């Protein structure tokens, strides 16, 4: 062996789901094979097995693989049977070794893998809520939405596994819940939550306030302008740190106050396209007293999860074409893809993510560099 894949040590807590007397292919070998092949662009267990047979010498740089490469059915069965909760916890443990110490904006959002449904068994497509460190562009964790459940249930479980001290957590309106806000602040973070009609009374009051705000209670607007392909978009950001009036007793006695609220904010967007003007206002609640410029940056950063995580999963990793449907397989392979994405993004070169995956398939030394983060390798 000429190297080690230290990230596998973070998955040593995983219990092999097979009866020990029947184990021919060790779990560490299967994990290394699946991750390496996924990094190299393989998209199902048939392709992963074929890749492994072609790259057996490479895999033996790290582990013995005395029995060679398992059948694709074995790979499928093992990945389906691995404890998904423990797998996600091991992933979170590994990611913490990659994170920088400086506080970051953490965006939380959901994505559906459309082909992962099983209509015959009444199984919905996999919907995964993910946490994304926007500055470092790192997947921090994930939580699957259970059947007949929703993101409101999944988000607190995801937050429980994350290190939030000093972070600003951004979530769309589905996450604008008192329990979620309390959990973020209890773990040392701040929240920035979109406000829509799912909190009708608060939304109505905030809309009314920003329709004619007192000049001495709002910040100076921060404006951004973008022009692209005949489209002119202007965004005006305004914040207000005077929030005591919002939860007075004027509507009914003992009205619950949204926990730790320190700021309300508004983004007004004007889009001019082909002579037509479209306007929209979006509203937010926050536990942090941001200035208008910092608020604008946080809102902008949140949408990075769509462009830099969900879009990459669909276009580069072809997640929408994934057809794994049984057991814990869909959730576990989603974690593997997040591992691969973090490793590909960590590489410091001028190649696109797509090209890095192709290089990993073509050049074993480059793949080793991704797996080990060994900058001395070429």
Image (cartoon, grey):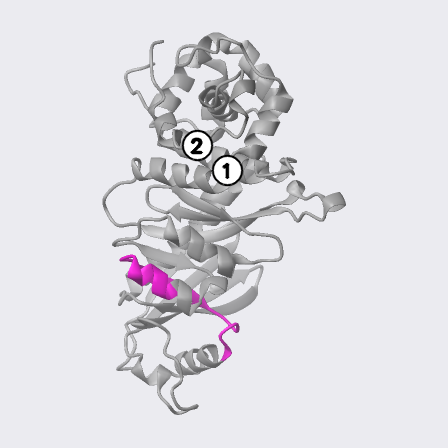
Residue at the spot 39% in from the left edge and 53% down from the top edge: 159
* Circle 1 residues within 10 Å: few <14, some 14–19, many ≥20: some
Depth check, front residue: 7 or 356 = 7
Depth check, front residue: 301 or 10 = 10
Q: Secondary structure at mark 2?
A: loop
The mark found on residue 13 in the picture is none
Residue at the spot 48% in from the left edge and 23% down from the top edge: 27
Q: Secondary structure at mark 1?
A: loop
Q: Is 223 left or right of 307, judged from the image as shown? A: left
Q: Position of residue 10 (x, y in %)?
A: 36, 31
| Residue 265 visible in image | yes
Q: Is the residue under label 1 in contact with that under label 2 (CB below 8 Å)?
A: yes
Q: Is residue 188 magenta?
A: yes
Q: Is residue 184 magenta?
A: yes
As displayed, is residue 114 above or below residue 58?
below
* Circle 2 residues within 10 Å: few <14, some 14–19, many ≥20: some
In the rendered structure, which disc, 2 or 1, sits on the residue that comes first in sequence?
Answer: 2
- Asked where in the image residue 141 lies, by quadrant, the reply is top left
Residue at the spot 34% in from the left edge and 22% down from the top edge: 372
Q: What residue range appears in magenta?
A: 181-200
Q: Position of residue 355 (x, y in %)?
A: 48, 25
Which quarter of the rendering shows the C terminus?
top left
As displayed, is residue 41 above or below residue 180?
above
Q: As drawn, which residue projects farthest toward the right? A: 120
Q: Disc 1 designates what residue? A: 83
- Asked where in the image residue 346 lies, by quadrant, the reply is top left
Count of numbered circles on the image: 2
């Amino acid at each position: 062996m000429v190297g080690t894949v230290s990230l596998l040590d973070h998955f040593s807590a995983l219990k092999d789901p097979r009866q020990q007397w029947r184990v021919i292919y060790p779990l560490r070998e299967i994990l290394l094979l699946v991750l390496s092949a996924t990094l190299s662009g393989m998209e199902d267990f048939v392709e992963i097995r074929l890749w492994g047979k072609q790259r057996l010498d490479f895999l033996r740089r790290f582990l013995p693989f005395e029995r060679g490469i398992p059948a694709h059915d074995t790979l499928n069965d093992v990945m389906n049977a691995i404890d998904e909760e423990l797998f996600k916890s091991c992933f979170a443990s590994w990611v913490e070794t990659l994170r920088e110490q400086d506080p970051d904006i953490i965006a939380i959002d959901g994505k559906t893998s459309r082909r992962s449904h099983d209509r015959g068994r009444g199984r919905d497509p996999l919907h995964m809520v993910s946490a994304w460190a926007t500055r470092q562009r790192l997947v921090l964790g994930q939580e699957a939405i259970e059947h007949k459940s929703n993101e409101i249930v999944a988000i607190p479980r995801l937050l429980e596994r994350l290190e939030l001290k000093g972070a600003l957590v951004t979530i769309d309106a589905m996450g604008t819940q008192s329990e979620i806000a309390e959990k973020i602040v209890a773990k040392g973070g701040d929240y920035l939550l979109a406000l829509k009609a799912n909190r009708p009374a608060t939304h109505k009051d905030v809309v009314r306030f920003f329709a004619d705000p007192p000049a001495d209670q709002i910040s100076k607007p921060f404006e951004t302008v973008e022009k692209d392909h005949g489209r002119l978009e202007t965004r005006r950001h305004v914040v207000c740190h005077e929030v005591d009036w919002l939860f007075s007793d004027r509507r009914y006695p003992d009205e619950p106050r949204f926990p730790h609220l320190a700021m309300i904010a508004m983004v007004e967007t004007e889009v001019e396209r082909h002579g037509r003007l479209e306007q929209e206002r979006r509203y937010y609640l926050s536990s942090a007293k941001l200035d208008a410029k910092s608020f604008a940056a946080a809102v902008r950063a949140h949408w990075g999860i769509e462009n830099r995580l969900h879009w990459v999963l669909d276009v580069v990793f072809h997640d929408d074409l994934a057809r794994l449907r049984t057991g814990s397989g869909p959730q576990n392979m989603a974690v593997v893809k997040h591992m691969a994405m973090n490793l590909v993004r960590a590489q410091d070169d001028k190649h696109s993510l797509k090209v890095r995956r192709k290089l990993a398939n073509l050049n074993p030394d480059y793949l080793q560099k991704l797996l080990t983060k060994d900058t001395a390798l070429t």
